[in-house]
Every structure is written in structure tokens, then in C-alpha cells.
Amino acid sequence: MLKQNLTQKLVKPFIVDNTGKEVPWQPLQKTLNECRVALVTTAGVHLKNQAPFDVKAKKGDASFREVSAKAPLEDYLITHTHYDHTDADKDINCVFPITRLEELVQSGFIKGISATNYGFMGFILNALHETLIANAGKVARELLKQETDIVLLTPG
């Protein structure tokens, strides 16, 4: 009881857009071992067989890439020029911890990983925010279809 009251005090609703509408805090209703987890990254992660993010676009690239949880690690690639991803190029788990999630599934700590995870570039100027918000909504709806319970957002 004390923990829940403290959480409610510390975690305040946040504003999602210019309408001023707030998203209320929603505590997790399941135990972690009953939850499917997805990764969503703004680190520019995609698969080698997918089009890279447009790093030359002056306003950024608000598109996203679908990333299969079953893709071999050597198929991951990062296209981003606004952070140093040298270490992540050596081990994608620095920004897209797919192997760590697989370990959590194997240990029974979580139920599973969403079949499709998502990569964004993360460098987006104001002119593309509406596109980004629309694409984030598409991703959220797809994650709901996959019965995703938790989304782990990782930055670049």
C-alpha cells in the first residue's frame, strides 16, 4: 500500500501533445513472468536488408523500421550520425538489448519478446513531430496486436 501511494506521488501524468491531454499512470497488472516485452529504440537500429535512415535529411527522419526478434545479431545495423555508436556497432545490445531479453525469457523472468520490435532514428526536428507522433501511434497499435505488455525504450 505504501509503495503504491509513493509511486502515485512520484510518477505524475505527462502531456503527450499540444492538446494538453494527460496520460494517467497505469500500474502493471501482471507479474513480469507473465509479460511480453518489446524493444523500441531511437538509436537508429535496423536490419541490414532494410533501407537505412536518412541521416542527410536536415529535419531528421521520422520513419521507423520493423525489427524481428529472431534476426541474427550480425543482421543488425545502426544508421545514425548524432551520437557515437562505436561500442554499439561491436555489440548491438548496448542500445538494443535483444540478447539480454532472450536471457530473461530463458530464465523465466519474462514470458517472451514481441515478435516485431521497432527502430527509429531519434533525430527529429519540430517540423516532423506530427509525422513522428503518427508513426509512434502506428507502432503502439502494432505492439498491442502482438499482446505486448511492456515496452523498453532505448535511446542512442
Image: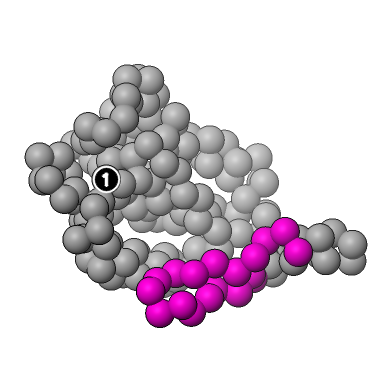
**Residue 103 placement (x, y as % from top left):** 57, 36
The image position of residue 101, as x and y in percent, is 53, 41
| Quadrant where the C terminus is found in the figure | top left
Q: Main secondary structure of the magenta part?
A: loop
The verdict on residue 102 being magenta is no
Report which quarter residue 25 is drawn in. Answer: bottom right
Question: On screen, 30 above or below 108?
Answer: below
Q: Classify residue 100 as left or right of residue 45.
A: right
Q: Nearer the viewer, residue 6 or 43?
A: 6
Residue found at x 65% / y 40%: 107
Q: Give left or right: position of 79 versus 92.
A: left
Along the viewing direction, whichever of 113 and 144 lies nearer the viewer: 144
- Judged from the image, the secondary structure of the residue bearing numbered disc 1 is loop
How has the structure been colored for display? one colour
Vertical comparison of 87 with 80: above or below: above
Q: Position of residue 110 (x, y in %)?
A: 62, 50
Q: 10 Å neighbourhood of mark 1: few (<14), some, or many (≥20)?
A: many
The residue type indicated by label 1 comes to: Phe
- Residue at x 72%, y 59% (from the top left corner): 10
| Bounds of the magenta segment | 9-26
Residue named by callout 1: 123
Q: Is residue 103 above or below residue 148?
A: above
Number of marks? 1
Residue at 25% over, 68% down: 130
